Amino acid sequence: MFESFGFETLTPVTASLYLALAIGVAFGVLAEITRFCLRRALTSTDAQDRRAAGGVWLMALAVALVGTQAGVGAGLINFEAHRYLASDIPALAIVLGGLAFGAGMVLTRGCASRLAVLSASGNLRAASVLVLFAIAAHATLKGVFAPLAAALAAVTVPFGGALPAIAAPVLALGALVFALRSGAGLKMLTLAALIGLLVPAAWLGTGFVLYDAFDPIMAESLSLTAPATATLFWAIASTAITPGFGVGLIGGILAGALASALLFKRFAWVSFDSPAQTGRYALGALLMGVGGVLAGGCTLGAGLSGVPTLGFAAFLALAAILVGAKLAARLLNESGSVSGAQATKQALQPAE
């Protein structure tokens, strides 16, 4: 469709950069207001806060499911060649990566998307994790960890493909029912629904509107792992590469979250409390970076954007992330790992 626009200087890659900037800004604003984070829905010590966070996340997922599959049904979105729907999936890499990512987001007190939002809100802990996360992910894609990743990815099982289309409304209805009963509030659920709409908007934009048979680009949606590596590489070699969707998405999220934090007076400088805490966050960033690549995405890429494809690989990755987070929270006893004033302080910071 892109070639029909008649642009003479704008390429699909550059157009995807602008599209991602707009989507990223919207996500950054909405995620900052709603405190959008799957980790909080899994491990928050406050039961009501945990249910509300889960309701927000599931409302976004419900809308993403319906919107994405509506696009598929209309023939506007095609996932036939997408890795999430491959017939043979790298199950070992996905499971190990998901477990590692889940454990990492517990150690860092936030999923990757939440840490990106917090980084723009003045949280230096989150910013440090985001940088280390990008470095670890890049090392797994193209660096010292790449041979290990390739070896794990070589172990495949033939039960890939996708769930039938009827699964989308069934899953969406279940998510919607939980969301409406979560106590999250109409305002937060409405904003969460808008987050969900960004998923099919991105799939539609990159996979249909910007599709050019002579200069094709990859269909993409909301994610953090691949965009973080693309942004890191562009930041250190910008004269050699053209920024695309990933760079625009990260830039947009940071800009949107910063604007929202400043507007609502939530911007505040926050740093590490101790060397031990620094080490914990660094380890979590490493696990998230390596795990995100092995699993094929994070809670945003494999979860919010991946599950709506109905690909088995996305469901397996999300399940592994959930198990990894739960196991890490239980083993580390996160809520009791600090004491005294430090415990009180961290309890007031829901996702860091």
Image: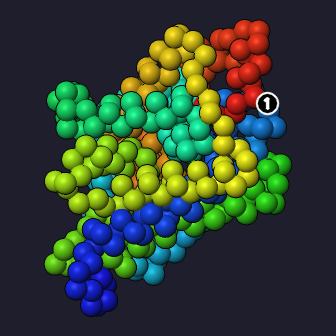
Residue 72 is situated, as x and y percent measured from the top left of the image, at: 44, 73
**In the picture shown, does residue 252 fall above or below 8?**
above
286 or 67: which is nearer to us?
286
Q: Is residue 87 above or below residue 81?
A: above
Residue 124 falls left or right of residue 341: left
25 left or right, relative to 218: right
Q: Quadrant of residue 174?
A: bottom right
Name the amino acid type tagged 1: Asp
Q: Is residue 273 visible?
A: yes
* Residue drawn at point x = 24 percent, y = 39 percent: 141
Quarter assignment of residue 158: top left
Q: Is residue 167 left or right of residue 334?
A: left
Q: Secondary structure at mark 1?
A: loop
Q: Return the residue at label 1.
A: 46
Residue at left offset 83%, top offset 49% = 183
Q: Position of residue 17 (x, y in %)?
A: 36, 65
Residue 44, percent across and down? 71, 30
Quarter of the image containing the C terminus? top right
**Residue drawn at (48%, 58%) of the image:** 252
Residue 46 percent location from the top left of the image: 79, 30
Q: Nearer the viewer, residue 306 or 222?
A: 222
In the image, is residue 262 above or below residue 140?
A: below
Q: Nearer the viewer, residue 313 or 302?
A: 302
Name the residue: 52% across, 55% down: 255
Count of picture labels: 1
